[in-house]
Image: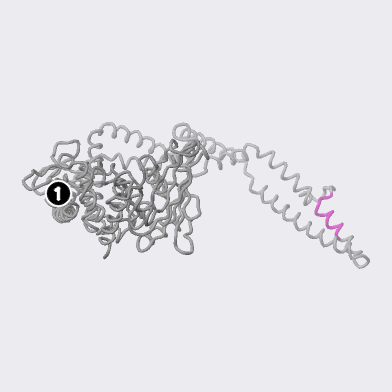
């Protein structure tokens, strides 16, 4: 659960901390006091979009911090992801989150002591938190959201079937588009293929090798300067090891080193220093001998063949012909040839390949149609159970005669999407199947079943959404649920029933409720009040926990706007007593 939430510099909130508990937490306050900023802060903490316009000018940045303490599968998933990203949960297993937004719009996030992308907060939020507000009611009116709600209710096997359909659909569309493109652009593809083949033929004839141009350039330089190289090597060899002819009187390095070594060695018995120097001269003589041997080998290998030089000129000319057309160097030409071969395989427009692609398209189409049929059957079965359970919840929300129907209808063909034959009928199909799902409300016996957007008032829609959430909660979901004034447009007995349902939901989840209804607030395990302070030059708000008499006064204010009215307080205390009895297991 979310143990604590601290908000600084956000909207009218200067600096406040919300101590939260398990069960049902209610947040109340006068209109404009800053209740919405609490929900906004939660949104920021879990990766929501940052609005710099809500940041207070002083201190110039808003910060939201929270401490999560999780258990079960949610803890396992979140801890694994945090550790993988480089964070470290506290010793007690809790995870610290923070989000900072400046007046310039810059945003920073920290998770478990490490700086992280904001998307990491969103990943954690998906595991631990679900926020429901009046905007969610509007979203629930969209057919796609209604279909998604039914699929969510269907359970793991249903979702596995849906995922399998999406994978097959993606493969089918990819093969279909590829086949259509090959047929539609056959002429252009053939022309491109011909040009690539011409280039590959030319490169194949020359058969360039990696690094060949640089090797040939170096060899050509040696052949072009063979005489100069030979003269230099011979002179160096003469100086090091003596002339080839013994009549030459010029002393060489090897002879001089030998004479010096022997002279010093003769005096080694008198002075050990000269003996050490003679050893070092012996090492120098060995190195000079190695150089002399390498010079000899170099002279033996030095080639001045004019025919070889002509061959090199011709080969380099052939390679330059390739580099002028295809790349800057020979390695680039070889890479171009590799890309051309890959592209040629993509441009293949042979009848054999087209037939093979067409067969694969038909196979995948059959697979998609079969999976779509199975998904439709699964949705119809889930729709019956979903409608029954939501209807039961509506009866407990002061709508005893209302009934929910979930219609699973074939998607009409002819829209801007592909069509397939599913269960013997031609239908439109997409990655989510071939169905349109519509939630319908029968408000009372004899009333027609109307779509939610036409058949539900604001208060009825709030209760339908809450009923759906209660049904979902029975099958798991995030451990913390936030309801932002979902009871708008509701009053009287219906408000009491909403409070009961939220309290029941709080037995298995942490529930945070922003409400203006005292009937709902009375059911809370912890009651927090957002209060505005207008005593200074700048209006600020803070949050405090109310208990006992203070709580009764807050409920009296919500009931009649008279927190000091004895009658209002008596009514509030009665409401609290009723709620306490209802909360008992």
Q: Nearer the viewer, residue 139 or 184?
A: 139
Q: Nearer the viewer, residue 190 or 265?
A: 190
Residue 64 in the image: x percent, y percent?
Answer: 45, 47
Magenta includes 461?
Answer: no
Residue 152 in the image: x percent, y percent?
Answer: 24, 53
- Residue 333 appears left or right of 198: right
Q: Nearer the viewer, residue 253 or 424?
A: 424
The single residue placed furthest to the front in the displayed view is: 566
- Residue 84 appears left or right of 343: right
- Residue 408 appears left or right of 260: left
Judged from the image, the secondary structure of the residue bearing numbered disc 1 is: strand
Question: The magenta stretch spans which residues?
Answer: 251-261
Q: To which residue does mark 1 refer?
A: 406
From this viewpoint, is residue 456 visible?
Answer: yes
The single residue placed furthest to the right in the displayed view is: 270
The residue lying at 61 percent from left, 38 percent from top is 221
Above or below, 372 against 191 in this view is below
């Amino acid at each position: 659960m979310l143990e604590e939430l601290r908000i600084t510099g956000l909207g009218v909130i200067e600096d406040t901390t919300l101590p939260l508990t398990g069960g049902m937490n209610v947040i109340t306050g006068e209109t404009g006091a800053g209740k919405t900023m609490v929900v906004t802060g939660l949104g920021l903490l879990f990766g929501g979009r940052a609005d710099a316009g809500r940041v207070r000018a002083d201190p110039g940045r808003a910060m939201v911090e929270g401490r999560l303490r999780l258990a079960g599968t949610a803890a396992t998933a979140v801890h694994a992801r945090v550790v993988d990203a480089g964070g470290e949960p506290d010793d007690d297993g809790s995870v610290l989150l923070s989000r900072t937004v400046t007046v310039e719009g810059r945003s920073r996030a920290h998770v478990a002591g490490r700086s992280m992308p904001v998307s990491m907060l969103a990943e954690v939020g998906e595991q631990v938190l679900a926020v429901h507000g009046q905007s969610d009611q509007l979203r629930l009116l969209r057919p796609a959201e209604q279909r998604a709600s039914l699929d969510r209710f269907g359970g793991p096997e249903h979702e596995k079937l849906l995922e399998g359909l999406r994978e097959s659909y993606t493969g089918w569309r990819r093969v279909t588009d590829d086949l259509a493109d090959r047929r539609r652009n056959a002429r252009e593809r053939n022309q491109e293929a011909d040009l690539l083949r011409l280039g590959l033929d030319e490169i194949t004839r020359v058969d360039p090798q990696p690094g060949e141009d640089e090797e040939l350039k170096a060899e050509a330089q040696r052949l072009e300067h063979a005489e100069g190289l030979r003269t230099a090597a011979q002179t160096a060899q003469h100086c090091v090891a003596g002339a080839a002819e013994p009549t030459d009187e010029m002393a060489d390095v090897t002879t001089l080193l030998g004479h010096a070594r022997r002279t010093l060695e003769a005096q080694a018995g008198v002075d050990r220093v000269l003996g050490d120097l003679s050893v070092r001269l012996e090492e120098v003589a060995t190195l000079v001998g190695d150089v002399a041997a390498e010079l000899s080998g170099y002279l033996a290998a030095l080639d001045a063949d004019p025919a070889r030089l002509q061959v090199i000129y011709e080969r380099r000319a052939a390679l330059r012909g390739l580099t002028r057309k295809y790349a800057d160097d020979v390695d680039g030409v070889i890479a171009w040839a590799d890309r051309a071969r890959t592209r040629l395989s993509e441009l293949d427009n042979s009848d054999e390949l087209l037939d093979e692609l067409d067969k694969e398209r038909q196979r995948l189409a059959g697979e998609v149609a079969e999976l779509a049929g199975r998904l439709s059957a699964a949705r119809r079965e889930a729709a019956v159970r979903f409608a029954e359970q939501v209807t039961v919840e509506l009866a407990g929300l002061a709508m005893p005669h209302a009934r929910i129907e979930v219609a699973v209808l074939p998607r009409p063909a002819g829209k801007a999407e592909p069509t397939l034959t599913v269960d013997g009928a031609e239908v439109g199909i997409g990655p989510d199947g071939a169905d349109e799902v519509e939630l319908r409300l029968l408000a009372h016996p004899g009333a027609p079943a109307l779509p939610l957007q036409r058949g539900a008032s604001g208060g009825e829609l709030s209760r339908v959404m809450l009923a759906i959430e209660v049904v979902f909660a029975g099958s798991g979901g995030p451990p913390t649920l936030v309801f932002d004034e979902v009871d708008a447009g509701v009053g009287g007995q219906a408000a009491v029933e909403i409070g009961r349902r939220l309290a029941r939901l709080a037995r298995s989840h942490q529930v945070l409720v922003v409400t203006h209804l005292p009937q709902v607030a009375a059911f809370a395990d912890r009651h927090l009040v957002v209060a505005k302070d207008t005593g200074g030059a700048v209006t600020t708000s803070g949050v405090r926990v109310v208990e006992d008499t203070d709580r009764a006064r807050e409920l009296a204010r919500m009931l009649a706007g008279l927190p000091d009215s004895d009658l209002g307080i008596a009514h509030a205390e009665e409401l609290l007593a009723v709620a306490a009895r209802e909360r008992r297991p």
